[in-house]
Every structure is written in C-alpha cells, then in structure tokens.
Image (cartoon, coloured by chain):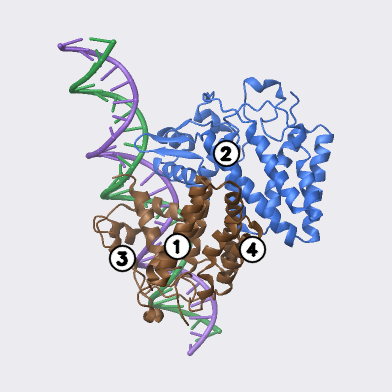
Chain colours: A brown, B blue, C green, D purple
Amino acid sequence: MSNRSQAIADILTRAILDHRLVPGCKLGERELSEVFDVSRIVIRQALIRLADDGLAQIERNRGAFVARPSMQDAMEIYDALTLVEQGVAAQLSDRLGPAGWAELRQHVERQRQAVASGNDALADVLGQEFHTVFVRLSRNKVMQEIHAQLVRRTTLLRSLITADFDYCNLLDDHARVVELLEKGRLKPAMELIDAHHRSVVRGYIMDRQVFPELTPREALEPYLDGKAGEPPKPAPRKKAAENGGARAHTHVHVVK
Amino acid sequence: MSNRSQAIADILTRAILDHRLVPGCKLGERELSEVFDVSRIVIRQALIRLADDGLAQIERNRGAFVARPSMQDAMEIYDALTLVEQGVAAQLSDRLGPAGWAELRQHVERQRQAVASGNDALADVLGQEFHTVFVRLSRNKVMQEIHAQLVRRTTLLRSLITADFDYCNLLDDHARVVELLEKGRLKPAMELIDAHHRSVVRGYIMDRQVFPELTPREALEPYLDGKAGEPPKPAPRKKAAENGGARAHTHVHVVK
DNA sequence: ACCACAGGATTGGATATCAATCAATGACAA
DNA sequence: TTGTCATTGATTGATATCCAATCCTGTGGT
C-alpha cells in the first residue's frame, strides 16, 4: 500500500478519461472521502495532483471540478500535441534504429488487422496506443511524460464533443506516417501529422451543456472494490447507444 | 490570502531556482512547517506540487528532497527543450506578425545593450527571459506552461554543475536566431537552437557531491517576512566568489 | 568484525475542530 | 410580482493531536 493519494488520483484520472466523470462534475471532498473511505486530506492531495495535471480545476472555497476546457484550450492542446509529435518524428527519422522501425511497422500492422477483422474496440485502443509507442521510441522520459499529459487532456476533451463524424480517412494516417518517415521523407510526414490533428480538432463541436448522468459515487464504484474490480467499463452514452459499446473516440470506426 | 500550499510551493520553487536549496537537500516536513509557521499538512501539499513539477522527489517514509537529476535526465530535458523551441520557431516563422518580430528584436537589442554596458546581471536575466518571450509569442498557454516547466528544470540542473567555461560565442545566438527566422531561413535557425542547447549541455560536468551550505531554515528566511522581503538574493557560492555576485548561469559572460 | 534487536525519529494518515467563504433560502419592501 | 438584503447551511481551508508504519541508528552480544 503505497501512496493513497496517488492511487486515488490515478483512479480519478481513469474515471475522467473513461468519461464516467464529465467536465464540470463536482468533486466534493466529503463525498469522495466516503467513496474511497479515506480522510478528506488524502482526497485534497489527490485533487491537487489532478489539478496540476490539468484534469481538474480547484476554485477557492468552492471545491474541485472536472476541468472544462474551452475551445481555445482545445486548439492549444492540439497545437502542442502536433508540435511534440512533429518534433519526435524529426528525431526518429534521424536516430531510430531498425528495431524501432520494426516495432512501429508491427504496431501499425496489428491495428490494420484489428480494423480488417471488424474489432473496432481493439482498433480504438491500438490507435490511441500508437501515439504513445511513437513517443516512447524517442527514449526520452521527459518527452514521454509531457506527451502523455497532452494525450490525457485530449481524451478529456472528447467528453465535451459530439463525435459523430466520419473518420475513415484518418485510419491509415499512422501507417502512412511510418511509411513516409522510414523513407526519410520527413516534411510530408510532419505535414500529415499536422493534418491528422487538424482534421480532428476541426470536427470538434463543443456542446456547452454536458450532463453528468452519474454521481461520482456511481461513476467510481467499478474502480473500487479492493482494486480487483472489473475491467474498465466504457462510458454510458445516451445518444451514441447504437455504437455497440465502443467509446466515442476519434479513432473509432464510425460510419455516419 | 489564497492557497497557502500554492504560495509555499512557489516560495520553495524560487528558493530552488535561486540555488539556495540545492539538489539532495532534505525538505523535512517538521522543519518547513516551523519555518513557514503552518501545519505539516500544508507543507505536504506544497511538496506534492513540487514533486509533480519535477523539482522535488518524495520517497515513501523517508521524506522529500530537492530533485537530483542525473546526467541522463539533463540530456533528456535539454532534448525536450530543443524540440519545443524548434517547434515554436517553426510556428513563429509562419504566423508571427510584425509586432511580434519587433518585440523580439527589441528584446535582443536590450540584451545587447546590457552586455555592451557591462551589466552582466541584467544580461543574465534578459538572456533567460528571451526564451520565455520567444515561447509566449506563440500565444499558446499550454505550450508556455510546458516550456516554463522545462526551463525550471534546466535552472535546477545548474545547481549541479561547475559553470566555468567560456560562453562568449553563445551570447549572440539569440540575435542570430531572430535574424534567421525573420528572413524565413527556418532550417538554419532550428539548427542554431539545437547547437545552442547542445553546447550548453556539453559543458555540463556533474559533480556528484553538492554541499548544502545552508539549512532550509536559512535558505528560506529571505523569502518570508510577510512577503515584503528583500529582492531575491543570489546564491552564495564558495568557489565562484570572483564572479562579482553574478549567478553561475549559462548566459553569464564569464571569461575563463 | 558482524549480526540482531531495540529505540528514536520521521512520514503517512485519521479524526475532531474551527474559521472563512459561498450559495441557497426566505423575509421584506416597492 | 419582483427585487433586494440578511440569515443560515454547507463546503472548503487549515490546525492540532494522535496513532501506525517504516526507516535509521546505535548498542550489545557473539
């Protein structure tokens, strides 16, 4: 049993990234302390970590809330993400060894197979994972942490949008980026990364009103239970009910 | 009087960046709580913020210490900083308006005058500030925060090195970067940024042993005093006594 | 010299308590 | 009815005290 507050911060983070805790949701200290069965102080420390990570916002004497980024924030986050991934692409095209390129190709191939076999959920996970693997190959832990934080914030952003556009043409971007980079065609690869993120953020339509649907108590219940809880559940969405359980995610194969 | 723990974290950060609290220095909860006259819990919260920022390291049941980054960390931090500033440079060369270029030129000019008039301390401050101004012109708060965090960590790194090499040829780098960028010569500018940071990190010689010389109580005393304290004092350095009070900093004009 | 054990010191956390501040409620007047 | 103001309740920010777990150290025995 290591740091309680860190563990709780991790659980809250996962709940937010799973869209079980939506932006604007109140994170009351008393309520959370009862849910996790710890004192308020541990909750406060966890909330401080979340706020430092950009996932929560603490207002003095009013409490903590799941962060509600603005459209401006969204664009800045995607700009930063583009900048980071373009930079990593430039580094990789210089320094990546054969094993690294093989890992990238293999990852893309797994994603291709998942899409071909209709396993949209797996394709979704792999699509998210690709960016992380990409940055991991830079062998720079500082860069990895910065990138991971940006990815977390983009995942939070997806709680705020209605993701019902057509992403079919984005599915092959990862493969093409790897292909271009391996051929040494850095500039087109970087432009493709930019276009990739741009087309994502262009599809964003922030609907101001997001309704919780779940109390924090209900939202967090599956993560508790002595950490032997069930696997992370997808977020329940009223509108996207026909989505077959797949999360509303940019990489999911949604045919409008 | 807003958040106590945030205010204390800010003070601790400044003390670390001023090299009054050196890497490895123990940040005991009891001691700090007496120094700041607050409860231990507030100190814990401040230390959590510092740890999240990479400036402190918390070991379970052993306490918090000022972070002691390794040489590997140093290279990764500078790699990340290079990546960020190169990316920002690329963005600015695309989108920066005349007012922005004017601000950059003016800043460089101020630095040039400071160097010319022998005001090494001012030149030092301006040299640090340049990077911040540079990133601020991207008008991306997310990027600014990432960059600021990296800069904090580079400042921490300077506590670990003996900065007695010749940086004369680096003094004009800022001016040349601005000049190249404004002419649209992006690639040379980016290579110059890379070379700038590379030559800095190449001069790093980490001496494992860093002696505190100051207890946290002494180190923090000037920052207290009802926030009306004297201006931030430079760190006392035994060896670099001939340095005329200027901090051991990469941009300082040290003639070997 | 070396190992084991005990004690001290420090952190991690719980609980109870108080002050400060915000928000909702309700009373009252126009 | 509506708008304004005061009271009240709830929540956070912070403190003090206490206890458990763990690490460090120092001592004693072999």
Chain for disc number 4 = A
Query: Toward which corner of the image does residue B183 lie, by quadrant?
Result: bottom right
Between disc 3 and disc 1, whose residue precedes?
A: 1
Confirm whether circles 1 and 2 share one chain.
no
Q: Amino acid at mark 4?
A: Glu
Front of the two marks 1 and 2: 1
* Distance in Å between CA atoms under marks 3 and 4: 44 Å
Callout 2: residue from which chain? B
Residue linked to disc 4: A191
Q: Type of residue at label 3?
A: Arg
Q: Residue at x 53, y 28 (%)?
A: B218
Tag 1 residue: A109
Q: Which residue is mark 2?
A: B75
Q: Secondary structure at mark 2?
A: helix
Q: Position of residue A170 (x, y in %)?
A: 53, 71
Q: Residue at x 81, y 31 (%)?
A: B118
